[in-house]
Image (cartoon, rainbow, N blue to C red):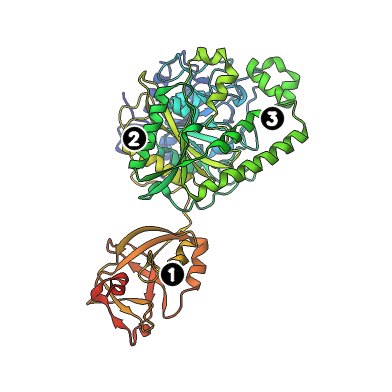
Amino acid sequence: MIISLTIPALHAAYRDGSLTPTALIEELLARSARYPDHAIWITPPERARLLDRARELEAHGMDDLPLYGVPFAIKDNIDLAGVPTTCACPDYAYTPQQSATVVQKLLDAGAIAMGKTNLDQFATGLNGTRSPYGACRNAFNPDYISGGSSSGSAVAVALGLASFSLGTDTAGSGRVPAAFNNLVGLKATCGLISTHGVVPACRSLDVVSIFSLSAPDAQQVFAVALGEDAADAYSRAALPHGFDFGRAAQFRFGVPARKNLQFFGDAESERLFDAAVERLKRLGGEAVEIDFAPFMDTARLLYGGPWVAERYQAIRAFVDAKPEALFPVTREITLGGAKPLAADAFAAQYRLRDLQRQCAPVWDVVDCIVTPTAGTIYTRAEMLAEPLARNTDLGLYTNFMNLLDYAAIAVPAGFRADGLPLGITLFAPAHQDVPLLHLADLWQDDRALPCGAVETEPPVKPVSPVVAIPSGQVRVAVVGAHLSGLPLNGQLTSRGARLLRATRTAPHYKFYALPDGKRPGLIRVVSGGASIACEVWELPATAFGSFVAGIPAPLGIGSVQLEDGSSVAGFICEGIGIEGAKDITALAGWKAYLQT
C-alpha cells in the first residue's frame, strides 16, 4: 500500500474512507521494519500503544482535530509521557510522567506519536554519528551522514515513517538534517514554541524544530505548536509578521558575496546554490549582494566562545559524576564548557552586541537572506576521521541564527550528480516565520518535486491554508495625492508602507476635483459611476492610526470596493465636500486629471 503522508493527503483519505488511522499504523509499522540498520529509533514504534491511539481517534472522529491521525516522530531529548528520554545516553535515561508542552499540544490536536528518535548525544553535533545507538544513516545513501543532531527525526520523515517530526535546533540541528534528507526544516523564532519538557543544550538558544514534507504541512504543525508557555522562562508571544514577502509579487533577498561563500571543494553544491539564486529571481526576487562576514563572525562565537558553558551547565551534575557515560567527542566538547570564566561570558556578550549591530542594517535593504544550508555533505568515514573540523564546516551557515534571533527555514534545492540532496536556507528577523513559510511554499510549487526519499508525487496542497500568525498589516486604497510620485506619498512610505498593486475601483464611483484643486473626492453612487484608478498600499496597523489622524475633512477612510470585487479601507469623501467641486469621473483617475 502506497500512502502519501502529507497532511492534506492523509485527511482526504480519512474523509473518503479509503484509510483509517489503524490501517495507517499497520502500514507504518511494516515500513519501519524495512530499515533495521539505519539507527533511526531509540524507542521504536510499539504496536499495542499505537493501535490503542488509533482506535481512540477513530472513536472521537476528525472534527476539531487539525492533526487527526497524523503520525509524528520525536527527538529523544523531548519528553513523551511514559516513554524514556535518553538524549542518546543510556545512563542518563529517565521516564517522564508528562509530555513536553509542544508534544502535548500535538497530541491534543489528534497527532499520533510514533516513537523517539536517535540523535547526536545531548544534541551536540550536526552530523548524526555521535550516538551509542549507532550512526543514523542518510535516507539516500547509507554511506553518508544524515545530519544532526536531529538525525533520526529527519530520516524518519524522509523514509516515510512519519508525516512530520520534532527536532531541536540550537546550532543548525533542524536545518542540516533537512538538507541532507530532502526535507523542509523550520527553525522558528526563538521562544515561539515552548521548550518546557526539552532537555536543554543551550537553554537560552534552544528551539524546537519541525521537519516536514512540505511548507504548508510545517505551517499547520507550527500553528498548533506555537504559543506562550508560563512554564518556559524563554517563551514569548508571537508578534504580527508585517510585510508578507513570501506572497508578494516582488521581494528583495540577500546573497552572500562570493568571497564569503564556502563550499569546501564541492562544485555540485556550488552549482545547486547558484541555480537556487536564479530560481528565486524567477519567483519575483531581486538579489542584493551582502557582506556576510559579520554573520560568519557570529557563527564562530557559538562554539569558539563561552556559550559551550551552557552545554556543560545543562548536564553539569551528570557529566561531573559520570564523565565516562558520554560519547567521547561529546564529552570533550561538554567538559570544555567548564573552562570559560564569567569574564569570558561578558566579553562574548559585548562582542555579540557589536556583531548584532553590524548585521542589523542589512534588513533595511532586503526582506530575507538565502544561503546554502551546508556547504557540502560528508561520508560517515570522513566525519569520523575529523569529527570536530567537519562538524565546524557544517555549521558555517547555521551557527549564528539563534545568537542573532532570526527565523529560518531550510528547503530542498535539488540533487548532486551522485543523487544526494542538498538544500538552501531562507532566513529573516524574528517573527517573520510565516512569510518564510509562504516563500518556501512558493519555492516548492515552482519546483513541483516530491519531498523526502520515498514520496513519489509533489506535496498535496491544503484546501484552506492555515493562518498561523496574523500579519498586523492594514491595506488602504489611495486615489489622490498619496499615489506614487505625488506630494503626499511620503505620508505612506515614512510609515513603512509598501505598494501592493496599481488597480481600479469597481465601476460604482463618481470622482471630483475638490475646490482647493489639490485633492480629489471619491463618492460611491447607485448609478452613473465609473471605475477609478487607484493604488493599494499596505502599512503596519500600528502606524495606521497616525496616518488616518492626518486626513483633513471632507475626506476620510471608509470601505472601497475594487474591480475584483474585494473591499479594502480607502479614501472616501463626505457628500457635502463636493459642493463646488468639478466632476472628473470621465478622466477615471487623479493622475490623468493632473495631466490635463
**Residue 488 - label:** 1
**Residue 314 - label:** 3
Q: Which residue ends up furthest to the front in the rendered image?
A: 259
Q: Is residue 316 above or below residue 286?
A: above
Q: SS at mark 3?
A: helix
Q: Is residue 490 above or below residue 386?
A: below
Quick one: label 3, few (<14), some, or many (20+) residues within 10 Å?
Answer: some
Query: Do the residues under discs 1 and 3 have CB atoms within 8 angstroms?
Result: no
Where residue 485 sits, quadrant-wise, is bottom left
Residue 550 image position (x, y, % from top left)? 49, 73
Residue name at image x 65 percent, y 40 percent: 352
| Residue type indicated by callout 2 | Pro
Q: SS at mark 2?
A: loop
Of the pair 124 and 243, the residue shown nearer to us: 243
Q: Identify the residue under disc 2.
A: 459
Residue name at image x 52 percent, y 35 percent: 209
| Residue type indicated by callout 3 | Ala
Quick one: label 1, few (<14), some, or many (20+) residues within 10 Å?
Answer: few
